[in-house]
Amino acid sequence: MLNKPGEEFVQDGAQNVTQKDVENVIIKSEEIQRKFSAKGPLARFIEDGKLLISIVKDYWAGAYRQVPYGVIASSVFTLIYVLNPFDLMPDVLPIIGQLDDVAIMGACLILVEQDLHKYKDWKLGQA
């Protein structure tokens, strides 16, 4: 059913996500969020990045469990990928170094879109 390499990459990576990876995303959430700055290729994903971090935190805290673990694992894998400066295209390369992060973020959002919308609705209802 999947025909996009980015989606397959995210799903494959998600299969290897550990509890320690989830903890790392929570611990480093502010650092990850800074990667989604108003400048640079990831700028269009600022809100999505915040939402991915939030769903991981709420899942981990037990506040929101109406989501398959695969969605959490895909989110964690993607956030760790964005944080890692030495991924497929090192982030030290201007612009090009972040294009792979953009591609992986886009692929993740395709995979988790429906569940992310449900979570966002739930989150808005909590306010």
Image (cartoon, grey):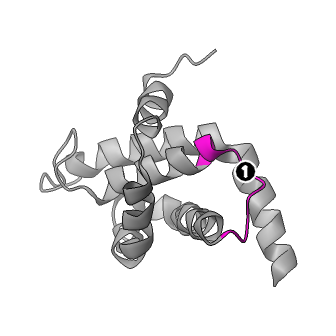
Q: Position of residue 109 (x, y in %)?
A: 58, 45
Q: Quadrant of residue 54?
A: bottom right
Q: Position of residue 50 (x, y in %)?
A: 55, 69
Q: Position of residue 56 (x, y in %)?
A: 57, 63
Looking at the magenta stretch, what is its main secondary structure?
A: loop
User: Is 93 a magenta residue?
Assistant: no
Q: Residue at x 60, y 41 (%)?
A: 70
Q: Quadrant of residue 29?
A: bottom left
Element under disc 1? loop
- What amino acid type should be assigned to the residue bearing mark 1? Val
Give the labeled residue for mark 1.
67
Q: Residue furthest left?
A: 92
Q: Nearer the viewer, residue 65 or 84?
A: 65
Q: Residues within 10 Å of mark 1 (few under 14, many from 20)?
A: some
First to last magenta residue range = 62-71
Q: Is residue 19 above or below residue 29?
A: above
Report whether residue 39 is seen. yes
Q: Residue furthest right?
A: 125
In the rendered view, does 94 fall on the left or right side of 13? left
Q: Nearer the viewer, residue 65 or 81?
A: 65
User: Is 70 a magenta residue?
Assistant: yes
Q: Position of residue 13 (x, y in %)?
A: 40, 36
